[in-house]
Amino acid sequence: MGKLVRIVEEGDVAYNNPIVLEGLPDVGLVGTIAASYAVEKMGYKEIGYIESDLFPPVMVIHKGKLKSPFRIYGNESVVIVLSEVAIPPNAIYPLTEALADWFKAINAKLVISITGLPAKDRMDIEKPEVFAIGNNEDAMKKLEAKQVDLLEEGFIAGTYAIMQRECSKKDLSAISLLAQCYPVYPDPGAAASVIEALEKFLELGIDVAELNERAEEIKLKARDLMRQTALSAPEMQKEVEQDIPFMYQ
Amino acid sequence: MEIERGVIKAMWGCEGNLEPLYDVEDKGSEILVTFDLPRVKKEDVEINTTEDTVEVIAKMSNSVCWERWGGIQKRITFQAFKKQIRFPVHIEPEKATASFKNGILRINLPKMRRAVLIGID
């Protein structure tokens, strides 16, 4: 019996202090849409996958080829983690722990979780704003230098929340970029906003014009993943993100 | 409020309709339902309500065609979204209102209620 979650590397990448992007399914599928768009636009190769007995017994077929739905793309300087199926809530702790261990092993200089911030009035927001969270002083300095608005009070829940904690435990700098989004509908507009914020850190020159132009097509393709993700949201305690934390100050 | 939600069944039918993503929220005196309707124009949305249901049929401006679709592995085309939602409480269909913006349909359905004033002894 091995580890609960295993990172399987394919190929031989000589990592050079990469920046890691985590875009696992969450509200609005912001991270998933943004991560897969970045993979496509930058032509990143598949460099690994994640396996676990805690994951659903699902494989995906693309162009006749069998793949894990939990995959890792990138090169020596950028690594992107994404999934085509919802993350089971009971897999979040071992998954984030295994990922943080691996990020440490490849000497990641920064871990960036990209996700959404549910906005009840999203329908009336033309361009979603992006907020950020940092897990340590170094991360906060980076956010300050890039002039990203900070999320100053509130609860965060889900994979990215625990990813921040696991990175802290391993002394890895981590930030989360959260774009205002529809809670239960795929949101390519929010993904475009988050990519623009991401550009301040990556400087890859990713143009979001195509993402905006193909927004309706993306929404149609992302329906099933959105539904799966929304079904697991109550178990992820996502509703707590709407609550006000209490601390006497 | 218990709302019927298809967990196992596919979100599409062979008759050319897709099931839209939707959300139902009990706001106390009314039920708020939203639908995500990409590729749909306001004038192509039809909403029918009864005392305990709302049905939306929305024609897409461009049909969706997928080759080798999922389990059936053949070409399939969808022209419209269609969904009926049944509520566990009665609503007042004639007082329902709707708006459509950025591909999101929002329907406010006031609940049917008889207000009874309770006196204090």
Image: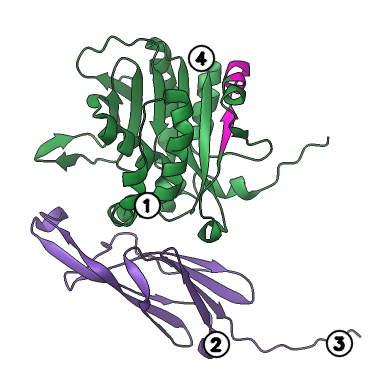
Chain colours: A green, B purple
Q: Which residue was labeled with disc 3?
A: B119
Marks 2 and 3 share the same chain: yes
Marks 4 and 3 share the same chain: no
Tell me the distance, in whole angstroms, between the alpha carbons under discs 4 and 1.
31 Å
Q: Magenta stretch: give its range.
A: A131-141
Report helix, strand or loop for mark 4: loop
Residue B117 screen position, x and y as percent: 79, 88
Q: Residue at x 56, y 26 (%)?
A: A146
**Residue B29 visible in the snapshot:** yes
Q: How crowded is mark 2: few (under 14 residues within 10 Å), some or many (20 or more)?
A: some
Residue A39 screen position, x and y as percent: 29, 32
Q: Nearer the viewer, residue B105 or A66?
A: B105
Q: Residues within 10 Å of mark 4 (few under 14, many from 20)?
A: few
Residue B22 screen position, x and y as percent: 42, 65
Report helix, strand or loop for mark 2: loop
The reply to whether callout 2 and callout 3 are in contact (CB within 8 Å) is no
